Amino acid sequence: MPRAFVARLAALGGIALAPSLGLSQTQHDGHAHAGTPPAAAALGKVHFPVACSAAAQAAFDDGMRMQHSFWFEAAGEAFRTARQADSGCTMTHWGEALSLLTNPFSQPTAANLAKGRALLDEAKRLGARNEREAAYIEALSLVFADADLSRHRARLGAYRDAMARLHQNYPDDTEAAIQYSLVLAVAASPADKTYADQLRGSEILEREWQRQPDHPGIVHYLIHLYDYPPLAERGIRAAERYADLAAEAPHALHMPSHIFTRVGRWESSIATNQRAAERAVVAGDPEQEFHASDYMVYAYLQTGQDQAARQVMDGAGCATGPVRNAHAFAAAAMPARYALERGAWAEAAALAPRQTAYPYTEAMTHFARAIGLARSGRPQEGAADIEALARIAPGLRGRDAYWAEQVDIQRQAAEGWSAFAAGRREEGLAVLREAAEREGRTEKAPVTPGPLAPARELYAEALLDAGQYAEAQREFEAVLRNEPRRFRAVYGAGRAAELAGEREAARRAYSQLLEITARADTQRPELEQARAFVGVQ
């Protein structure tokens, strides 16, 4: 349970239980450390043949076991150990460069791109020991070709194409198949609703899984490939396997929640993220701790376990100095979620933005503030936050087109609710509808369990306030097709149906809400409304 969970974390890492999300600086200094290298058996089975000494091969395989579970610092250390055992093992340079990409679904830092390029240049200087290894080094070099972050997505596309050729030229190389499948997921366009690349990658991995049932990368990357509303059911088997297969890796313990979130299995998400956060503290990995905590907070809030969500949020570590993407994201997302999911509009309005190296994390706070101000009857006070969103989005376009679009959708949704709350109802509804359509044409980022407040849900809630009950019910149900068992959408569908006179539809929605919140630890007004309607005391 959350209180015991926080107490365990406090004992391990010196956690300060405070709303400021504080943690001892000695354990969490802004860098994810390797910690004690885990036992190989606890990370699955991987054999990536390289033309190196036996000792280097064993260390290289250890590195790949950790790399496949995104345990980057430990992987890099293993590749360096392999190089000490065989100084001419050029694939160790490839492996260490791969680890410097860190989570491939996020942009790397310019510093890491420079370090990786130096490693790959050294590998080329030494000379690969065979054509296959030369192909791996040349392919990865495309990702590290320069440090211009605005070109990173294009470089990933070039790497994907090179890995396609490598996979074609070496069809029996299972690691080539796995790496190619991963980059198909990473480089896939968020606007492609046919999910062509994801389905191609998953087809390759499903075949490989039959051959290598204990390979951690296969189940890990299948989860990523299926992390989309229409595909999520296909990922349940991989989600249920991965945490036990690689139980020593914090990321492996967290990853099943990507699928559990997509299908609304909130209690399963809570349980696996508890394990992930605990393991991350032991491993000295604040980024993974925060990432798991954000998903856990989200799941608790969907089930009405608000006190549990607060305990997790207060107990999460906070590094001083520079922090990475997932850490900065979760630090901003958790308090914003905690306010918005509960409809605590004054709390949302009082949030304080914190500047980081990732402007879209600051944007989340401005978005939550603007929505909170609009919905607490002070829409004119949100102008500065909307202006901040309007400033952040263009600034991201040259660096990260995806987040530029997401922040601009937030800006549009905030403008829509502000206009609606200020009495310009038709204007506000039109703007909110367009924000919902824009958001529907893209996808959520892997770093988040979902938007802070789905634009379509915000539109539906405005329709409900405007007395357009049938339209509101339709929009809430559309939200639930993408985000099943989501608290505010389930309640909204029930309330809209009730007010539209659709009593059986209202009863179904309210009954589902009470089922989802069977372990609720708070009395939200929505739950009181649902209980009153269905006659539950």
Image (cartoon, rainbow, N blue to C red):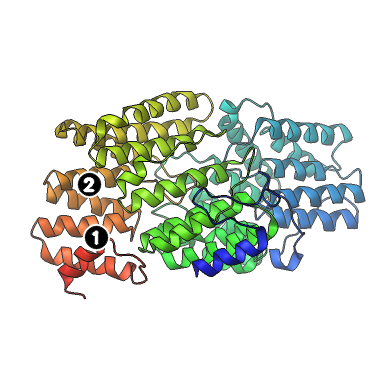
In the picture provided, is 525 more to the left or to the right than 273? Answer: left
Where is residue 419 drawn, in percent x and y? 22, 31
Q: Which residue is outermost to the left?
A: 501
Whether the residues at callouts 2 and 1 have beta carbons within 8 Å, the answer is: no
Q: Secondary structure at mark 2?
A: helix
Drawn side of residue 374 relative to residue 235, left or right: left
Residue 320, relative to residue 178: is it above or below?
A: above
**x, y (%) of residue 198?**
50, 48
* Relative horizontal placement of residue 22, taking residue 39 as reference (left or right): left
Q: Nearer the viewer, mark 2 or mark 1?
A: 1
- Circle 2: is it few (<14), some (14-19), or many (20+) Cα within 10 Å? many
In the displayed structure, would residue 402 be above or below residue 201?
Answer: above
The location of residue 394, given as percent across then percent down, is 44, 23
Q: Nearer the viewer, residue 70 or 387?
A: 387
Residue on which disc 1 sits: 525
Does the rendering let one see residue 75?
yes
State which tag comes first along the sequence, 2 or 1: 2
Please tell me in which quadrant of the rendered image residue 248 appears.
bottom right
Q: Position of residue 423 (x, y in %)?
A: 15, 33
Mark linked to residue 460: 2
| Residue type at tag 2 | Ala
Q: Nearer the viewer, residue 147 or 273?
A: 273
* Element type where label 1 sits in the image: helix
Find the distance from the CA under tag 2 to the CA under tag 1. Answer: 18 Å
Query: Looking at the picture, which amino acid does disc 1 mark?
Result: Pro
Q: Name the quarter where the C terminus is drawn.
A: bottom left
Binning the other alpha carbons within 10 Å of mark 1 as few (below 14), some (14 to 19) or many (20 upward) gives few
